Amino acid sequence: MKEYSKQDLDKIYKERRKKLSDYMNENSLGCVVFIDSEEHRESAVAYLTGHANDCVLMIFADGYTILVPWDENLAKQYGHFDKLVPYQRYKNDSLEAIKALLNIHMNSHAHNNKVELPPYLTYPQYLKFIDSLCNYDCRCKEDGAHNFVTECRMIKDEYEIECTKEACRVGDLIIDEVEKLVKVGKIKTESDVALLIEKRLRENKCEKTGFETLAAGPKRSFAIHAFPGYTDSPWPAEGLSILDFGVVYKGYTSDTTLTIAKEPLTKEQEVQINLVQKAYNECLKLYTPEHTIVEAAKKAESIFSVAKRKMPHTLGHAIGLEIHEYPRVSPKMPLELKFQPGMILTCEPGLYDSEIGGCRLENDVLITEKGNEVLSHSRIIKI
């Protein structure tokens, strides 16, 4: 992966915040507040500053950015901001921090007293904010600045694409090794493969799994998301076994699912894996700027409906700092919403049956100007 200097990253994060400050000026906002805590994780903080979690972030109309982190040392190492104020100065109270910093900085960095609060505040929390910030025109909107940041995150910039490609590269290394070890009988249980993933991702400078690894042998692969994620049951075994995992590199996750079909297979199992492969092949062709997201989703539905089968989940979803981001590849998306260059979404058709087990094939797809680039290389493996 390309090396990015601190100056490179400073520029990237400033460009992201510039989009938000432009939006704020267009909509007469003086300050936008983001809060990341155990009660609500807010990925916009990482998107706008590079700091991971547990903080208050305030961005003013002129772009001036104040980060109030719980972990000051971590923020200094990874964060990109104009001013850092330790959370402890305000007794780790987000409301007290916001009130004090608005009083100090609002007049010099904004043209009005309008403050947009996070839409995820509970009603009692919102009332406390309104009461304490009575000198400010506070608003809390579902379709406001926070939603604007979500829409910005839909189109990945160069750095985000590079990070996701690296996560997919490491994921591919793991998939190739899993296939090799399965074929020589060195992976025997769901725990074996799940723990292998944990070890390999860290050996390759990734941070964590994108979500709890789902390794389900034939007795559990009927579940879309097996519970628990993995056990000490045989994996793979005769029939259909599923492995769904992601790895995180510099905050950005991959998301892949492979199916291992261990012979002998029944006729019904053969039909099921062939249907999933067909849906994947046909739908992937529609992941281009010429097609709407609804077109791809309905294509999967039509392929399965001919065989009188129904997929119980959407065809895919965007990925990034979170495992599930906007948009979903679903018939419920706006009819006019097309795949756009810079989007990274999964294509993951799947079918599940309590008797014959499940099959899912999932890869991560970057939409390009001319079509798409498949970043990961998961597959249906027959052994």
Image (cartoon, grey):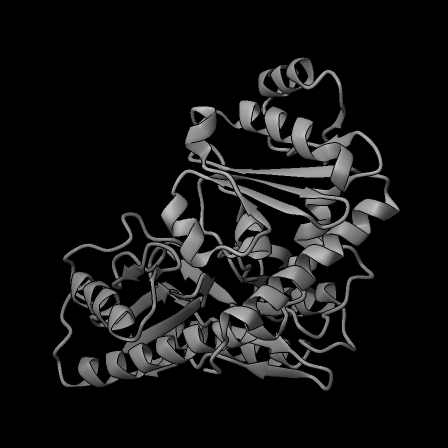
- Up-down relation of residue 232 to residue 119 (above or below): below
- Up-down relation of residue 123 to residue 157 (above or below): above
- Up-down relation of residue 221 to residue 183 (above or below): above
Q: Toward which corner of the image does residue 197 lie, by quadrant? A: bottom left
Instruction: Please indicate whether residue 210 sits to the left or right of residue 182 in the image.
Output: right
Q: Residue furthest top?
A: 131
- Up-down relation of residue 32 to residue 217 (above or below): above
In front here: 188 or 320?
Answer: 320
Q: Where, quadrant-wise, is the N terminus in this rendering? A: bottom left
Residue at (86%, 42%) from the top-left corner? 27
Instruction: Please indicate whether residue 120 sits to the left or right of residue 53 in the image.
Output: right
Residue 264 appears in the picture as rendered: no
Horizontal and vertical percent for residue 240? Answer: 31, 69
Q: Where, quadrant-wise, is the C terminus in this rendering? A: bottom left
Residue at (29%, 53%) from the top-left corner? 229
Horizontal and vertical percent for residue 234? Answer: 16, 64
